[in-house]
Image: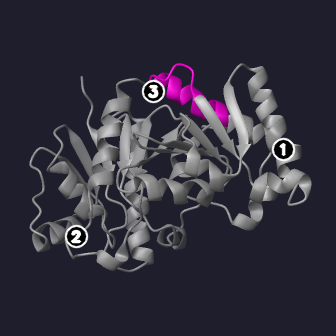
Amino acid sequence: MELPIGITLGDPGGIGIEITLKALQKIKGKFIIIGNLYALKYYSQSMHLSIPENVQIIPVNGNFLKKKVSRENGKIALRSLNIAKGLLLNKYIKSVVTAPVSKKALHIAGFNFPGQTEFFADIFHTKMYGMMMVSKKIKIIFVTGHIPLSSVSDTITREMIIEKTEIGIKTLMKLFNIKNPQVGILSLNPHNGEEGDMGREEIEIIIPAIQSLRKKKYRVNGPFAPDTYWANKRDDLTVAIYHDEGMIPFKILAFNKGVNFTTGLPFIRTSPDHGTAFDIVGKGIANPKSMIASIKLAKKLEKKL
């Protein structure tokens, strides 16, 4: 029996409801949408976006504020995530698509994770997982995620690079039918560290990780200086050491076409490749393409679990 896909509506002060309603007009299937009912009806009526009759709605209590980071909006988003968690644990759904949230709003509402990626990994106590950005042409997995740039050097280890790379390779093989992926691993420092003159992370951490991965017969190359890598190269998978190293080129090359996919979980979790976009809330101009891609990818991948 086909299970419905769960969709959390994210921060009700952002564009999550708008892009979800627009996306559901384009995609057929069974869905459970989880969010604030008052906000859902408000955006539906004000932007003339119909709520599909074939979807189940699980309402979330709370008074929302448009275009603002607020504790109440964060509480609504957090309640939505916890409802999705219950649906996953009780096997009512096996995939969830999450509309954009404000991390600041979540945190002031009591959310104890850096982001939704870590929240969903915690549901099944998953230790080996990764944030992967996916488009037709580019796939990027990150060694570190939502941490300050100043913490990256002290956080990365040889083992972390090996683990994230292996998770990415296995995901491409199992879910994306790429039998022997070619992988490029990026450097941390400018110019690959200039043989240690601009940092020793390449020599002491990244290159030893690459050597270990090659011993396991993986097709891994690098480290590559990111500036020239993105101008000249496309691998089946790119391993970025830190968030913006991968996110900036991904959004330049695949914005509104890409999906944030949490890999390594026993269920499918996807999300659009953008945020709450408070500046355009209520104008009816939010682009639903990434939400559409997120729902389609969830539908496709859950069949391979």
Marks 3 and 1: CB-CB under 8 Å? no
261 to 78, vertically: above or below: above
Badge 1, how many Cα within 10 Å: few under 14, some, many 20+? some
Question: Where residue 155 sits: x, y (%)?
Answer: 78, 54
Distance between the Cα atoms at labels 2 and 3? 33 Å
When asked about the image quadrant of residue 60, the answer is: bottom left
Residue 17 seen anywhere in this rendered image of the structure? yes
Distance between the Cα atoms at labels 3 and 1? 29 Å
Q: Which residue is mark 3?
A: 175
276 to 189, vertically: above or below: below
Most frequent secondary structure within the magenta stretch: helix
Query: Residue, x 11% and y 44% (percent of image)?
Result: 54
272 to 150, vertically: above or below: above
Question: Where residue 115 sits: x, y (%)?
Answer: 54, 57
Question: Where residue 269 sits: x, y (%)?
Answer: 43, 42
When asked about the image quadrant of residue 17, the answer is: bottom left
The amino acid type found where label 1 is placed reads Ile
Q: Which residue is mark 2?
A: 285
Q: Secondary structure at mark 3?
A: helix
Question: Counting residues from the N terminus, which is met first, the one under dot 3 or under dot 1?
Answer: 3
Q: Secondary structure at mark 2?
A: loop
Q: Is residue 177 magenta?
A: yes
Q: Which mark is residue 205?
A: 1
Question: Where residue 101 sits: x, y (%)?
Answer: 42, 64
The amino acid type found where label 3 is placed reads Leu
Question: Counting residues from the N terminus, which is met first, the one under dot 2 or under dot 1?
Answer: 1
The amino acid type found where label 2 is placed reads Ile
Residue 189 seen anywhere in this rendered image of the structure? no
Q: How many numbered discs? A: 3
* Residue range (magenta): 165-181
Query: Residue, x 42% and y 55% (percent of image)?
Result: 273
